[in-house]
Structures are given as C-alpha cells and as structure tokens.
C-alpha cells in the first residue's frame, strides 16, 4: 500500500519539517485558530456520525439541497473512502478519469474491482470522450476530479452532457471530487445527474485542512449508507472541529473573498516568474485552482530538482514523480504576495543551475 500514496510519503515523511515556505500543498494559504471563535462552553462528547444538524444544514445550503442529502466526514478523503466502500462490490467496473486523487484507483482495487484509468488529453483536460468509449454495461462508478489535481484543468462545459448521458445509460454513479470548486451551488456537477455525489471540504478553498472536516452531498440513500459504514472508520468527527467548520461556512463570503484576493494577486506573480525562464519552464494555465502545473525542461529528474529546492532553498514543491509523471512540478500561488515572491526567488537560484 505504500506505493499507493507517494505524495503522502513526500509531504509527511521526506519533506516534513524541512521547509519554511510551502509552495507545494494545493490549498490556499492556511488560516489560524485565532481566525475563529473557539466555543468554551462546548461539551466534548461523541457528536453525531452524520455531523451536527447545523453543519449539515450549512453544507446543504452550499448546494441548494436538503439536509438528508449531506453527510459530514473526517476530511474529503474519508468521504471518498466511504463512497467506494458502500457503492462498490468485487468485480464491478470502475472508470477513473486521470489525473486525480490516487485513492480512486487504490481503494477500488482493494475491494476487488476492475479499475480502468482514462488518461487526460494532451491539454491536461479530462478525456470524457475516452471515458465514454470505455464505458461498459457493468460500469458501477465513474470518478472525476474537476478542477483536477495536478494539472489545474476542469471538465470542458461541452463535455458535461456527454459524461452525464454516459453515466445514465448504464446507471453508473458519478463520484465528483470537487475540492477546488468555490461556488458549489453554481458550479458543482452534482445537480446535473440524479446519481451524482459531490465531495468537498474546508481544506482547499478555505485553507483549513487541519480541521479535517469534509462532506459528501448526493442521494439520501447513498449518504445514509456511507454514514452507516462510518461506524467502522472514524465513528464521528470532532465536535469542536465541526463547530468551527460551521462558523467557516457561515462566514463563507469572507473566506471566498480571501481566496479570490490571494489567487488574483498570486497568479500574475507566478506567470511573470515562469515567463522569465522560457528555456526551462512552461506554465500550464490553471482553470480555477490555487495551483498550477509547470513543465520542467532540461536534464535530470524533477524529483531531484525538488529535493534540491527542499534541501538548499527550504521551499516545498510537489514533484511530478509523486503523481506518476516526469519532468514537472505542481506549484501553489495562493499565498501572500511577499511569501510567494520570497519562495520563487529562492527557487530561482537553483533553477539557473538546471541545464537548458
């Protein structure tokens, strides 16, 4: 199983504690406990497996759905795991549109499913046409991450209807990893198909991955089954984390404005930096993500380059190798401009040593 999570090994083992500027993680710059009001009167009991009524209502409001269609989980990771465990059976066919979270392949394979990965188009966009062509009568689940990680590309609007029609034709569930969707009411694909389930959290857009609060939103029976299975995993979330997450969603306009400010300020800084190195870098323009993909031109591996950046510059980047790719890295630009400029300046010094 260790081979299933090379990103975790890179971030939590190889790089942990060795950098002071984080340009690798895919979330907007992290917030602090002081940004929220800690409820001193809160009783630290077990809470509810499905999440507090207040938090479920806040999530439901994001989508314009009912509370029964929402379950709260220990991060988006658990939401996806619960879906795979409750929707899939040994022998089921699973289509995974790449790129995306490695869990979409690893967990169904552990269940005994036949997993087929449809690689992305040369542009980095999900290959919906390829997925439609790979569809089978026994396809049980189609997994798509949009906007996706690490290319930063989203499903093309012209492809949405094709994807939904394909799923409906065989009765497949559509599992949507929508961690990077800011406006879930307007942009989530969950409302386009009756068997679609959206997964998100307060980690990426809100910059609070340490709260470990995520959710799934979809058909009420699917949510109920997933929450039943949760008794075998985390039982329930932290009631403190859920109370804080409810505050966050109640103040979502404020957090969305912060996200927009950091993304809007950071993107031209990154673009100018990449443009200054045309012989070594090629920036792929993101489509609604706080990070971008950069092709690294020249000799040597991107893993070696990112290790040098980590060791000598104390900056975290996400090398292509952790995504099963080569010659590139993911870089996050949703940081305070001063932090972003300082990090890029440090990377500059090592970039000049890369043979063109």
Image: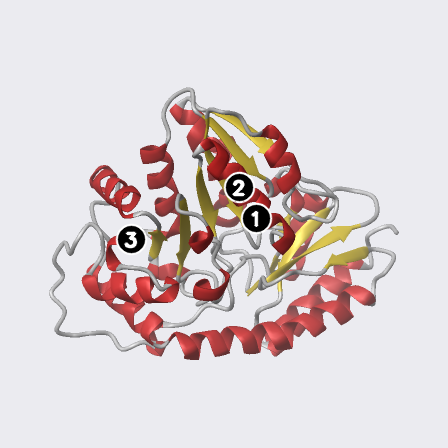
Q: Toward the viewer: 40 or 98?
A: 98
Asked whether, in this view, residue 75 is left or right of residue 256, the answer is left
Q: Toward the viewer: 131 or 161?
A: 161
Residue in view at x 30 percent, y 42 percent: 222
Image quadrant where residue 348 sits: bottom right
Give x and y (percent) for residue 268. Answer: 71, 73
Give x and y (percent) for residue 282. Answer: 79, 56
Q: Name the residue under label 3.
A: 69
* Count of numbered marks: 3
Q: Name the residue under label 1.
A: 161
Q: In this view, does 187 lie above or below 91?
A: below
Q: Is residue 343 visible?
A: yes
Q: What element carries label 3?
A: helix
Q: What element carries label 1?
A: helix
- The residues bearing labels 2 and 1 have C-alpha atoms spaced at a distance of 6 Å
Q: Are marks 2 and 1 in contact (CB under 8 Å)?
A: yes
Residue in view at x 86 percent, y 50 percent: 355
- The residues bearing labels 1 and 3 have C-alpha atoms spaced at a distance of 23 Å
Q: Is mark 2 on a helix, strand or loop?
A: helix
Mark 3 crowdedness (10 Å alpha carbons): few <14, some 14-19, many ≥20: many
Q: Name the residue under label 2.
A: 165
């Amino acid at each position: 199983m260790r081979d299933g999570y090379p990103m975790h090994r890179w971030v939590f083992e190889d790089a942990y504690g060795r950098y002071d500027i984080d340009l690798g993680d895919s979330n907007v710059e992290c917030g602090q406990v002081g940004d929220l009001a800690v409820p001193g009167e809160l009783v630290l009991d077990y809470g509810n497996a499905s999440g507090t009524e207040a938090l479920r209502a806040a999530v439901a409001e994001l989508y314009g759905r009912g509370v029964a269609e929402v379950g709260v989980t220990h991060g988006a990771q658990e939401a996806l795991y619960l879906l795979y465990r409750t929707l899939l059976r040994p022998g089921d066919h699973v289509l995974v549109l790449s790129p995306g979270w490695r869990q979409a392949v690893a967990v169904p394979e552990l269940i005994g499913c036949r997993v087929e990965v449809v690689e992305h188009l040369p542009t980095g966009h999900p290959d919906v046409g390829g997925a439609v062509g790979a569809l089978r009568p026994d396809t049980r689940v189609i997994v798509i991450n949009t906007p996706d990680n690490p290319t930063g590309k989203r499903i093309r609007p012209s492809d949405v209807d094709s994807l939904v029609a394909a799923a409906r034709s065989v009765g497949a569930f559509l599992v949507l990893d929508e961690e990077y969707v800011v406006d879930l009411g307007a942009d989530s694909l969950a409302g386009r198909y009756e068997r679609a389930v959206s997964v998100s959290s307060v980690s990426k857009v809100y910059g609070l991955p340490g709260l470990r609060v995520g959710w799934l939103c979809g058909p009420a029976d699917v949510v109920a089954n997933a929450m039943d299975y949760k008794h075998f995993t985390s039982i329930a979330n932290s009631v403190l984390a859920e109370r804080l997450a409810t505050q966050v969603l109640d103040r979502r306009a404020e957090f969305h404005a912060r996200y927009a400010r950091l993304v809007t300020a950071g993107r031209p800084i990154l673009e100018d930096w990449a443009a200054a190195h045309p012989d070594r870098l090629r920036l792929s323009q993101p489509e609604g993500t706080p990070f971008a993909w950069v092709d690294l031109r020249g000799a040597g591996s991107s893993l070696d380059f990112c290790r040098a950046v980590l060791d000598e510059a104390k900056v975290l980047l996400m090398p292509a190798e952790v995504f099963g790719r080569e010659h590139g890295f993911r870089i996050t630009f949703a940081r305070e401009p001063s932090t972003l400029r300082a990090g890029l300046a440090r990377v500059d010094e090592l970039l000049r040593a890369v043979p063109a």
